[in-house]
Amino acid sequence: MARQVISKAKEQAGNEAVTGNGEGAESTSRKRARLTAETVGELDKAWTKFAERVESFDGLRGARMVFSFVEGALVTAARTGGWILLDEVNLAAAETLACLGGLLQAERTIVLAETGERVRCHPDFRLFACMNPANDVGKRDLPPGLRSSFAEFFVHPPDANADDLLAIIRAHLPANTPPVVCHRVIAFYRAAKRLASEHQLVDGADQRPHYSLRTLTRSLTYARENAPAYSLKRALYDGLCMTFATQLAGTTQPVLLEELARVFEGDSLRQMLTRVPPARSQDAVLVQGFWLPSLSNSEADAADSAYVMTASVEAKLRALSRAVMCGRYPVLIQGPTSAGKTSMVQHLARLTGHKF
């Protein structure tokens, strides 16, 4: 069909070209533009491409592969008796929550809108849902009718209990960690949360930082993994600094660093932070006291000569190198326009031979 249309267009173009050479050409051009040979060629290409797509679609339709409904995790669990957890359920759309109504009733069924099938749940099927309190920023409550269908209980954070918090810290640090260090970490963690709640700490966006047990365990994991090379106390300082302090604005960061220094009271903090351990591998590059894995050192000299190193830049590069050496988490760099965020990462990539 497409080819026939193209042929008709060519024929019409030829007729108009002939008409354009004789009388009445002026009146014809006023009514519509004449098709030129170039225009006909473009139409031919467009129609040819369209014809190929039509033929491809017809082939899929013949094989009945155009559309296929695939059951999701919820329906699969309902059929097979699996357990499923709906996280942040209070953030789901109203249409999604409406689909859960049948699962929470005595008949325990779910209707598939796509097929019209009513699926009866397996006896072993269990539905769990989690939500943050509705008074948290950006959260909302569940509809009362839906919420009343759940067996509900509140989970208190484990860091609210001193013994639980001590057990968590001991589990994440090496077994030979002195008890006094563990208790000092608890004091620092609670001081950081208190200072944040009192708005004595703000991040680069002038917002109050959010510290949680996840923040603490990340720092302890960093300390445990880097203790063999940097010593436990040095790795612990770097871990706590990376997760608690580097996100803070310059005016409030010293307040938290003062609390952090109390964890290492009695130690020479300056001497501890300037100690550089042996390289972990032959291809490692030393950047601001941290050994970073390198692919090539060929661009190191060019990077050093093109990058202006000031005291503030060194402090930022030290924090970035610490996070890169961790290797576990992606790095978010916050700062105003032209603060040097991109150039700093580019410089570090050149030093370590990574493509940027």
Image: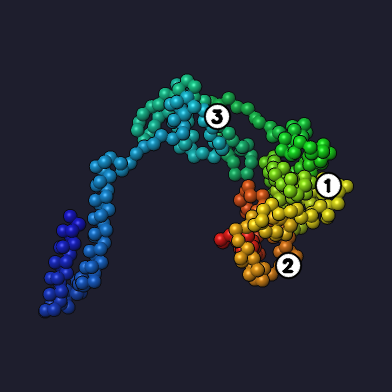
Residue designated by label 1: 264
Looking at the rendered structure, the secondary structure element under dot 1 is loop
Q: Are marks 2 and 1 in contact (CB under 8 Å)?
A: no
Residue designated by label 3: 128
Dot 2, how many residues are within 10 Å of its Cα: few (below 14), some (14-19), or many (20+)? few
Q: Quadrant of the N terminus?
A: bottom left
Dot 3, how many residues are within 10 Å of its Cα: few (below 14), some (14-19), or many (20+)? few
Q: Residue furthest front?
A: 282
Q: Amino acid at mark 3?
A: Phe
Residue 134 placement (x, y as % from top left): 61, 38
Give the Cα separation between the discs numbered 2 and 1.
28 Å
First in sequence: mark 2 vs mark 1: 1
Residue 208 placement (x, y as % from top left): 70, 49
- Nearest the viewer among 232 and 79 is 232
**Which residue is painted at 26% across and 61% down in the image?**
46
Give the side of residue 44 with respect to residue 349, left or right.
Answer: left
